[in-house]
Image: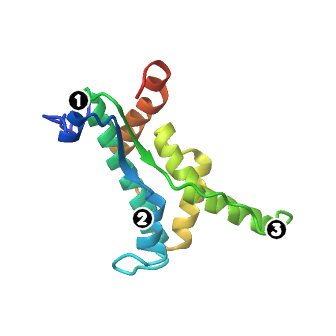
Amino acid sequence: MLGSVEPLSKKPPLQNQGFKWWEHVTEIWAVATNIYIEGTFPNGVQYDMASAIQLMHNMMVAHAKAVIAYKEAGYEGKIGIVHSLESKYPYDKTKDEDVKAAKNEDVLNNQFLLDATFLGEYRDETMEIINRLVELNNGSFHASKDDMEILKEAAYWYREVSKTKEL
């Protein structure tokens, strides 16, 4: 199905040792925020929201490719991703700007990645907020048609296949 992902020619050695659960990527939000927002990881970049968002998308596409290759190779077991989800609440729920800020944070930290994982697409609400955050930071975000097809195919494994058999 994917021209850019070749089926794996042999199973990883750990597969033969009884490991049935594979975590391909962990905590994309933590990686993105530490590299491009807080600057605590090398190269110390701070407040580059557009790069953080692009990185999260690119990491989700890489994960989706791994899920597809794993399933197409016929491995037994489960493959997945670990998200570091964070609850977001307005400082003052009676103030519109606080409610909006909490929603922005929720979309950036949670909804953007969950949309990619389980829907294989970004909802209109998600993209409205993501695009606004990128524009406010004088950046750009690009999700190609091919990227979106890959996300959609991997999301199929999470949604549809899991209804009938174990992932």
- Cα–Cα gap, marks 2 and 1: 29 Å
> Of 31 and 99, which appears nearest the observer?
31
Colouring scheme, one of rainbow, by chain, secondary structure, one colour: rainbow
Q: Residue 73: which numbered mark, if any? A: 1
Q: Is residue 126 above or below residue 79?
A: below
Dot 1 falls on a residue whose secondary structure is loop
Crowdedness of circle 2 by 10 Å Cα count: few (<14), some, many (20+)?
A: some
Q: Residue 92: which numbered mark, if any? A: 3
Mark 1 residue type: Ala
Horizontal side of residue 146 vs 34, given as left or right: left
Which callout, 3 or 1, points at the residue further toward the start of the chain?
A: 1
Which residue occupies 33% across, 38% down?
A: 67
Which residue occupies 42% across, 64% down?
A: 31
**Residue 56, image x and y in percent?**
43, 58
Dot 2 falls on a residue whose secondary structure is helix
Quadrant assignment for the N terminus? top left
Q: Is residue 43 above or below residue 8?
A: below
- Select label 3 or label 1 by which is in front: 1
User: In this orientation, does residue 141 appear?
Assistant: no
